[in-house]
Image: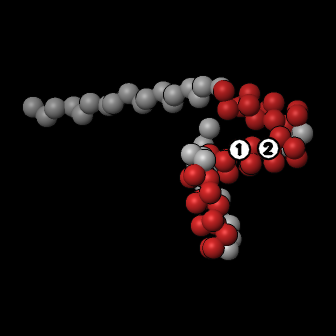
Amino acid sequence: MKKTSVSIMYDDEKLNAIRLYMSQRDLDFKEELEKSVDSLYAKYVPANVREFIDMKGSQVKPSKPKKPKIESEEKT
């Protein structure tokens, strides 16, 4: 599934404090943030929509057939 970036503005001192205390517990800020976003997704997106998105994401995209190369005729 394609990933995208999310950017928010947050107080620098608070963010540094979060990272400091998380590192003391051997926690990764990015992983915890992803868990939080996943929780929001589960809370607000209806189950049938989540199932549909999961089905779409698990489908293997068929590769496009390659066009055959046309060989140029040699001049005699």
Q: Which of 18 and 42 is in front in this view?
A: 18
Image quadrant where one finds the C terminus: top left
Res. 19 in view: yes
**Front residue of this view, candidates 75 and 49:** 49
Picture layout, residue 55 above or below residue 27: above
Q: Which residue is drawn at 66% across and 27% down?
A: 58
Q: What residue sits right under mark 2 in the picture?
A: 39
Image quarter of the N terminus? top right
Q: Is residue 3 left or right of residue 49?
A: left
Q: Distance between the residues labelled 1 and 2?
A: 6 Å
Q: Position of residue 67 (x, y in %)?
A: 42, 30
* CB within 8 Å, label 1 to label 2: yes
Give the image location of residue 57, x and y in percent.
67, 32
Tell me which amino acid carries mark 2. Answer: Ser
Residue at (66% x, 47% y) in the render: 32
Badge number at residue 35 = 1
Query: Going by the image, does 35 lie left or right of 50?
Result: left
Q: Quick one: SS at disc 1?
A: helix
Residue at 74% across / 31% down in the picture?
54
Within 10 Å of the Cα at label 1, are there few (<14), some (14-19), or many (20+) other Cα atoms? Answer: few
Q: In this view, does 60 lie above or below 9?
A: above
